[in-house]
Structure formats: structure tokens, C-alpha cells
Image: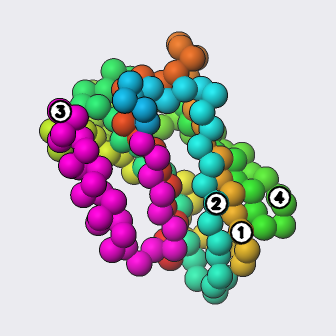
Amino acid sequence: MKTKILFLLSLFFILNSCNSGTFSQFDKMPENNRWEKSDLKGYEFEIKDDSKRYTIVFEFSHVYDYQFDSIPIQFMIKSPDGKEENLAVDLQLKDSSGKQLAECSGDVCDLKYTVKKQTRLNRGTYKIIVSHNFKAAPFLPNVIGIGLSVNP
């Protein structure tokens, strides 16, 4: 299974490197597949062309047949002028019938959530901090990795 996961992650990085998007980063969790509550994920990117509209997408990779229907995710977006926007999201992983919403290949499932769609971003450097507010444990189990992409 580890070989399969490494192969899929390698393929993901290769395909992402071909993407002409503005920003893309994926952070793999440690081997125990736990996203610790204290592990805030930071992403920083620069917008050079403010005449375009951008879409910000959160990527959540988890093991097949995830045990939760949803998880609480928080985004803190800091714009170049220093303003901060906080978004709390109940990330849905399964629909009302219990079917997984992620695209799965073997034991790995990838879910994409649009944080902002076709929004105007001012020129400058943005910082986005992603965290979870899972209450049942000090970590969120069975997480392979998370990422963020920003594309026009």
C-alpha cells in the first residue's frame, strides 16, 4: 500500500508541475496519516496580474472509506494590505446517502473544495493558513495530505 501511495503522490506532483496555474502546493502527512491539531498549514503565493479572477481550491487527500461524513476546516486568508478573512467550513466528505464525495483510486481518495471561485485578488502576496477544529481527538486521523491551488 505504501508503494501505491508513493506512486500516486509522485504522479500527482508530476501532473501538477505541468499545470500552468498560479500556485499549487501539497503537504503530505507523516506516515501515521494524522493531521495534528497544532499543525497549521501555511501557504503563501503572489498575485502579479490583478486583472484576472482567481479560484482558490483546497485539496484533502484521505484513506478510502473515511470514517466521518464531514470535518470542520478553517481558512485564514491574509491579503497584501494586511486584512484577514476567516472562513469556517464543514467540509462534506459524504453525501446524505453515505456515498464518498472524493475521487478514489485504490486506497487513496482526493476531495477538492472551492474556497473562493472566480474572485478578484489584488496584486501582492497572500498568506492562507489552514487548520482543522476536530474535537474528538488532538489529531484528525487517516489524512494522507492537504494542499492548496490558486488558478486564474
Going by the numbered disc 2, the residue's amino acid type is Glu
Going by the numbered disc 1, the residue's amino acid type is Thr
Q: Nearer the viewer, residue 26 or 131?
A: 26
Q: Is residue 152 above or below residue 148?
A: below
Mark 4 surroundings within 10 Å by alpha-carbon count, few (fewer than 14), some (14 through 19), many (20 or more): few
Kindly identify the residue that appears in the image at 35 percent across and 65 percent down. 16
Identify the element where label 2 is drawn: strand
Mark 1 surroundings within 10 Å by alpha-carbon count, few (fewer than 14), some (14 through 19), many (20 or more): some
Residue at mark 3:
1
Residue at mark 1:
125
Task: Verify CB contact (< 8 Å) between mark 3 and mark 4.
Answer: no
Q: Which residues are magenta?
A: 1-28
Query: Disc 1 vs disc 3: which is toward the camera?
Result: 3
Which quadrant would residue 12 be assigned to in this image? bottom left
Q: Is residue 76 above or below residue 78?
A: above
Going by the numbered disc 3, the residue's amino acid type is Met
Task: Verify CB contact (< 8 Å) between mark 2 and mark 1.
Answer: yes
Residue 119 % position (x, y): 60, 70
